[in-house]
């Protein structure tokens, strides 16, 4: 499909620079079958059914942005994918000033040796010394805000909390699974009271999620890979929900992509551990999930293609036009949408 089919115009003032307070006060656009409803995230229990299950990503964002020097050259690095105990692939600013074997000094006693360049343009960085890389990043790294926020304001102390979900546990992401940012203990208690369950999986979100598409046709796009794990006990719970007639609602496109990667053609979900580079576009047949809660995505992005595959391109373009007209806030710190394809159209 042509990438420009997924384009739309978004006014700059619709891009959220801070999250809603409290988090579950964010607005929620519900697409329930053919019906569109304007709600708030705190209304979520009334939008789902008893027996449904929400599936969250428990990855934790690390301070993956580094600023350093190679000689007189200023070098910026955003870690992308861990490939060894001390080695990461990174997207590097001013990479033309870095050669294989060069040392980059990131300050605070943190340095790395540059290695080979990947097909995706990333550079291999191997951190020197013996301290765990996690400790090095705590000293020298910054929270990796998305470029559409970082380009308008610097990261600050608030982001260290705002850009983590309440489920964050497994360190390794360089971007937050932002749909889960809307959840609070109070909302989880309300969901429990409504007999709506929840489970977690792990997918370490990579910086490639922010890369623009550089092709004209989706068939020519190579999706970035991300590492994920879905264990046997969780798989048993997910399959049991669907067998009992409940729905699996992925919270975020990261959860959706891992579940779909782990599901066979019959709709049975299996344990999974490894990399997934699944690329979902219109025409894809969803096998493992029955709905999605997600934020509003960039024009021409792989994530807008994914939601268009779930709900239909015309439906999503109309929904985004509605969201823009009615003042919804977009992107990582913005509002949310609940996408329920094929759900009976009932007003609630």
Image: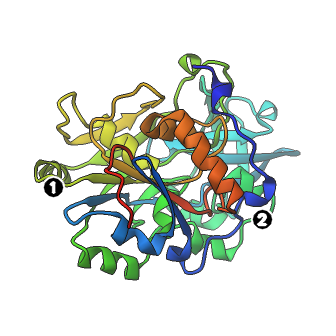
- Secondary-structure class at tag 1: helix
Q: Residues within 10 Å of mark 1 (few under 14, many from 20)?
A: some
Its colouring scheme is: rainbow
Q: Residue at x 66, y 21 (%)?
A: 215
Locate the N terminus and report the quarter of the image it occupies.
top right
Q: Nearer the viewer, residue 92 or 191?
A: 191
Please tell me the numbered disc located at residue 302.
none
Depth check, mark 2 against mark 1: the one in front is 1
* Whether residue 141 is visible: yes
Q: Is residue 181 left or right of residue 124?
A: left
**Residue 293 locus on image (x, y percent):** 43, 55
Element carrying mark 2: loop
CA–CA distance in space, label 2 to label 1: 41 Å
* Residue corresponding to mark 1: 237
Front position in the image: 268 or 195: 195
Residue 116: image x %, image y %? 61, 27
Disc 2: which residue: 154
Residue nearest the observer in this picture, 343 or 339: 343
Q: Is residue 132 visible?
A: no
Residue 18 drawn above or below residue 151: below
Which x, y percent locates residue 175? 56, 53
* Residue drawn at point x = 67 percent, y = 32 percent: 101
């Amino acid at each position: 499909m042509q990438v420009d089919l997924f384009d739309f115009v978004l006014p700059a003032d619709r891009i959220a620079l801070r999250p809603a307070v409290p988090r579950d006060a964010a607005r929620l656009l519900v697409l329930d079958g053919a019906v569109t409803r304007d709600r708030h995230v705190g209304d979520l229990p009334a939008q789902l059914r008893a027996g449904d299950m929400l599936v969250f990503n428990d990855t934790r964002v690390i301070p993956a942005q580094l600023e350093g020097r190679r000689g007189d050259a200023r070098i910026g690095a955003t870690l992308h994918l861990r490939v060894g105990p001390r080695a990461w692939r990174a997207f590097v600013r001013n990479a033309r000033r870095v050669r294989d074997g060069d040392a980059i000094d990131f300050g605070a006693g943190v340095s790395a040796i540059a290695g080979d360049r990947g097909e995706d343009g990333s550079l291999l960085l191997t951190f020197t010394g013996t301290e765990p890389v996690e400790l090095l990043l705590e000293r020298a790294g910054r929270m990796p805000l998305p470029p559409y926020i970082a380009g308008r304001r610097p990261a600050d102390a608030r982001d260290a909390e705002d850009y983590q979900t309440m489920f964050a546990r497994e360190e390794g992401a360089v971007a937050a699974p932002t749909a889960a940012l809307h959840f609070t203990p109070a909302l989880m208690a309300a969901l429990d009271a409504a007999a709506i369950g929840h489970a977690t999986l792990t997918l370490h979100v990579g910086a490639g999620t922010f890369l623009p598409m550089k092709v004209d046709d989706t068939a020519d796009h190579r999706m970035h890979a991300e590492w994920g794990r879905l264990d046997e006990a969780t798989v048993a719970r997910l399959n049991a929900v669907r067998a009992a007639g409940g729905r699996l609602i992925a919270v975020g496109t990261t959860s959706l992509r891992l579940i779909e990667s782990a599901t066979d053609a019959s709709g049975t979900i299996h344990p999974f551990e490894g990399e997934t580079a699944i690329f979902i576009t219109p025409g894809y047949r969803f096998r493992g999930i029955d709905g999605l809660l997600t934020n509003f995505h960039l024009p021409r992005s792989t994530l807008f293609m994914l939601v268009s595959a779930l709900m239909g391109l015309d439906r999503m373009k109309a929904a985004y036009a509605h969201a823009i007209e009615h003042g919804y806030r977009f992107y990582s710190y913005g509002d949310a949408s609940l996408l329920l394809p094929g759900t009976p159209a009932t007003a609630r």
